[in-house]
Amino acid sequence: MAISQLLPSARTMVKRLLLLLLIIIIIIIISIIITIIITICMPTFIVITTTITISIITTMATVLVMIVTTMIITVALSLAMTIITAHGHVWITSMKST
């Protein structure tokens, strides 16, 4: 399999992962803004329950960020290994032919 065939599919995969990462970061920012608004506007009991809920959402989003980052790193490493292996294979076959 040629390297030129591998690169476009890896690029689209990385773009999708980055888009997912962006969405998760937006969710975290929105939850922080909601927390601030609720803290300013509402009584203590409601603030406590909503803050707990939002902190759970933020924690889940943070975990998702970690998972996505790990996936991006894994894709990048596997792509790099594939390219290195393909180059090595080409180099070995060219060495054999001489």
Image: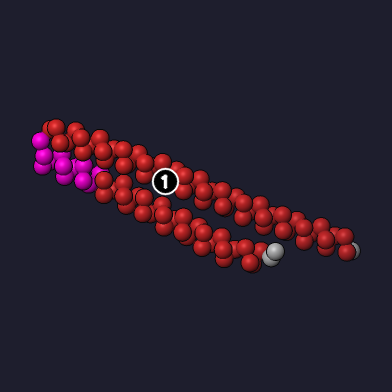
State the image coordinates of residue 25 (x, y, percent, origin top left): 35, 50
Residue 63 position in % (x across, y down):
41, 41
User: In this rendering, would 56 be left or right of 93?
Assistant: left
**Which residue shows up at 31% across the image and 50% down it?**
27
User: Which region of the structure is painted magenta?
Assistant: 32-43
Q: Estimate how packed mark 1 is, as few (under 14), some (14 to 19) or many (20 or more) residues with alpha carbons within 10 Å.
A: many
Classify residue 52 by image quadrant.
top left
In the depicted structure, whether residue 95 falls above or below residue 25 = below
Placement of 7 over or under 57, stated as above or below? below
- The answer to whether residue 66 is magenta is no
- Residue 58 in the image: above or below residue 93: above
Amino acid, disc 1: Val
Majority SS type along the magenta span: helix
What residue did someone put label 1 on?
A: 65
The x, y position of residue 61, in whole percent, is: 36, 44
In the rendered structure, does residue 35 fall within the stretch colored magenta? yes
